[in-house]
Amino acid sequence: MAQSDIEIARAARKKPIQEIGAALGIGADHLLPYGHDKAKVDQGFIDGLADRPDGKLVLVTAVTPTPAGEGKTTTTVGLGDGLNAIGKKAAICIREASLGPNFGMKGGAAGGGYAQVVPMEDMNLHFTGDFHAITSAHNLLSAMIDNLVYWGNEQDIDTRRVVWRRVLDMNDRALRQITTSLGGVANGFPRETGFDITVASEVMAILCLAKDLSDLQERLGAMIVAYRRDKSPVYARDIKADGAMTVLLKDAMQPNLVQTLENNPAFVHGGPFANIAHGCNSVIATKTALKLADYVVTEAGFGADLGAEKFMNIKCRKAGLSPACVVVVATVRAMKMNGGVAKADLGTENVAAVKEGCANLGRHIANVKGFGVPVVVGINHFAGDTEAEIAAVKDFVAGEGAEAILCKHWADGSKGMTEMATRVAEIADSGTADFRTLYPDDMGLFEKIESVAHKIYHAGAVVADGKVRAQLKEWEEQGYGNLPVCMAKTQYSFSTDPGQRGAPTGFDLPVREVRLSAGAGFVVAICGEIMTMPGLPRHPAAEAIRLNEAGEVEGLF
Amino acid sequence: MAQSDIEIARAARKKPIQEIGAALGIGADHLLPYGHDKAKVDQGFIDGLADRPDGKLVLVTAVTPTPAGEGKTTTTVGLGDGLNAIGKKAAICIREASLGPNFGMKGGAAGGGYAQVVPMEDMNLHFTGDFHAITSAHNLLSAMIDNLVYWGNEQDIDTRRVVWRRVLDMNDRALRQITTSLGGVANGFPRETGFDITVASEVMAILCLAKDLSDLQERLGAMIVAYRRDKSPVYARDIKADGAMTVLLKDAMQPNLVQTLENNPAFVHGGPFANIAHGCNSVIATKTALKLADYVVTEAGFGADLGAEKFMNIKCRKAGLSPACVVVVATVRAMKMNGGVAKADLGTENVAAVKEGCANLGRHIANVKGFGVPVVVGINHFAGDTEAEIAAVKDFVAGEGAEAILCKHWADGSKGMTEMATRVAEIADSGTADFRTLYPDDMGLFEKIESVAHKIYHAGAVVADGKVRAQLKEWEEQGYGNLPVCMAKTQYSFSTDPGQRGAPTGFDLPVREVRLSAGAGFVVAICGEIMTMPGLPRHPAAEAIRLNEAGEVEGLF
């Protein structure tokens, strides 16, 4: 493997996006092009699909992430290409990338090796502008709230209780906590507030959960933005912002179509993070793909404790989706790190550490099985993995009543994915899935948090002060008790301590704060020190990002 | 005229953008489509035009704006269509619209009546994402500055002297003055700063003045963002942000091509305001259009005291452009308001007030003539104008040694523009223009400000305290003395008092603050109370903006 991801991507033989659409039965007149290799699918076409049968939905999730890398998106792309290569009609659905982390340290979000989505530069930059539209819509509402207060505050908003913040698609710690409207009368009433990263916006969650534009506007209007002096909630519709926000989001709401290196269709749409939001691509993209393909492979963010849990308990519950099979991605390297090996020592064979680290994989397998969906483990192959290490993972998985398949899509594209694709299609076709959510709608909000904490994380006590519990009770009294919970927690551990790898048990889970996303339809429980606005590292990736002599982007990936 | 602007725009028989490009000789492979009716022209094609001769450049400017409306963009569109209708090969170049004002009170920026550019909804929303790219690039630099300070401040930045603020494309007065990095150690060092509107960003000015991507990066790197404790300037290149900013701007740098209602080409690119920035569309769009058309009609913002002055002294000076003819747009209604009539009384004939208000027009004519370029006045016809009022304007203009032509493009499209188009083509072809800037490069900075104040505004004293004068001196010593000045001033008067219509003289011009835009290449002189972040009105336009049953945008125009 002499070629880097970006070299492979640049050498891609892309087809015009109209050809990719045509293979799915989307006519060129129903594709709104963005350049020659990206397009949005128009709503009229989507509306016309309602009566078609749905394909099978496959979720790709992963073990707890480590600095070794797992390759969830890469595996999603590889599996989609693999299914197409064995003669199935398959499409993939992944999330869009956030600019902030791309200029920080994360690198791109379009897969890797010979399992990539292209054009990767565009996907890691502005793409089709969806995140910018979300930023604009979110901040229009913010400006209208302060403006309403400025011009006489006819809603009697308590300016200490404005819960709607602002957003930027940028890692900027200086904006986490700010004081606005300084400088005198012309600038309004000073108050404390702050910025989150755009992917943490409730608008992002709503865009990803809404059925259509009218559902989008309804949900936007239902967002709680502040409380009045009498403590009653002020909704976005009280600010009269929902119509204009919908106008700003009308194109962003349409799914984006691009292609894999093997010219198979990829829907890339929506992008909430799984540690601070619900972590899944849009419902509209997933449902559209299910109407157009027999198999749809999608992913959910970070480990299965975050992404898969929310995929099941929030996205599938809300959208009426039912996954037919789940692939849990594991790597020998990640097992080693979960088994206590430092990153620098990953190059040395260490079967004992692999076995030790498999406890993490085991818990994710059991968790996913708890949702009633068959599981297969995909071992994403790295060149340095030894036979003995791979065998150790396979043996462990067999002992858990599942099977593990070695996947070489990174090096070989679909050819490295034949076995996995064949097996996933068999499982999906077998109809053995019997999907159920973890908790019912009518369970109390705090009990829902406890359900996830105990059954998924294996926490001991859920620790929350009286204020948090009282807030949850109040929302239940206001009619929000039937909502699911969206856990905000570090992705690096089942616990809230990013240093605790493996499969810790009995730890306390502190719920620091709860937030009601009344429009998206969930209650966010912020556990531990998770940040809704990241910072940049000492040397941000941005320092090395530039155009080369040929006008190509360097340093972004 | 029963139809509204938006009804006319929706009824437009748009051609595919590839056909519009083909008429200019741009092949489809050189157009990057954004939907079916918008495209960017690629750099490779532009590079290949270098050896072609240039067409004639016509500037459309206007009298001092009043609430009566002048119709500068409408006239630009009408003149472009008019030139094409009389058999000339013409293109227009206008600016992109800013989201902020669209959701406040300004309304759209795509012309009106039968002289519009389409698709007007897109142009007034996200268009091709250029402003979002500028916002991202600007704020990436902001985040990197605070991040550098956070991680040890290796540039020894004086955090009290960070001059680089943040931007949003939003009218949000609450962000004008803020304190950032509150909340403790993890969020950095608290300091005062604020947000400007995106169109006021130096990045916007640079995008509009840069020759190509390499010039863009050079200029971005040369921006001064802060001062060290030893008072030496910190440049964006010291922050290592110039490369990543250029990557974020690589598509935004390419001119956008759309069409008029009559299917003639319109380049819509860049959008600095003329009251707080230099107010002209991009140099790259203007130069590209000049290579592709025999006549290029462009506009500059607000009245000729702002837009035209900066067009001449900044854009033409920097880009080596030389206008062949200037059209000053006037309306009977604006003359009446400049003559002291209230908006409510505009419906009543008032020849005396028209004559009185013509003093404003007279000064603009003289000012433009001072640049050595022939002037023709376009009277943008409104239905209520009387014969006597129109005659009064024509007589006045004749007395000033120029000619005024009645233009009915709003009602009749190109057919209402035949006389003006014919005359403009004659003047442009006559070669009578002898363009000169108002002041030489080697004049002192304060003297340049005085030049504009005295010769263009007819001010008495230019008032500036010692700190402002000392700052200008310091910049001269640092080698910035050869830059032109960019006046930031209310658009509603020659003076800094928006209430002073007509042609006031002898007033003081207070220079409140000066800012060095070392990358754009000018010194901004902030005169009076002008804001670089607007606010929203009591009832923002956003309250009424929504999608109708047919999915069309209502309320934006």
Image (cartoon, coloured by chain):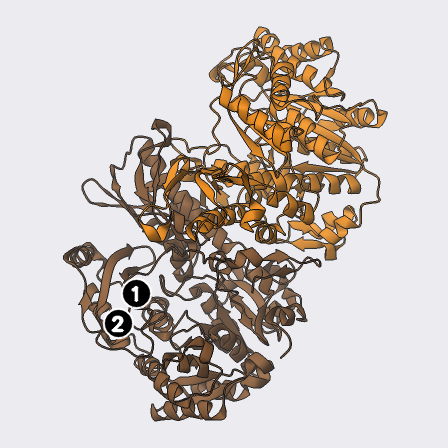
Chain colours: A brown, B orange
Where disc 2 sits, the SS reads helix
Q: Which residue is mark 1?
A: A487
Q: Give the x, y percent position of residue A228.
A: 23, 41
Q: Dividing the image into 4 quarters, which one contains the C terminus of chain A?
A: bottom right
Report if the CB atoms under discs 2 and 1 are less than 8 Å apart: yes
Give me the chain letter of mark 1: A
Q: Residue at x 42, y 79 (%)?
A: A334
Q: Give the x, y percent position of residue B375.
A: 73, 20
* Of B387 and A480, the residue lying toward us: A480
Q: Which mark is residue B355?
A: none
The picture quadrant where one finds residue B211 is top right
Q: Give the x, y percent position of residue A292.
A: 52, 72
Amino acid on which the number 2 mark rests in the picture: Val
* Of A441 and B449, the residue lying toward us: B449
Q: Which residue is mark 2?
A: A452
* Of B404 and B269, the residue lying toward us: B269
Q: CA distance from mark 2 to mark 1?
A: 8 Å
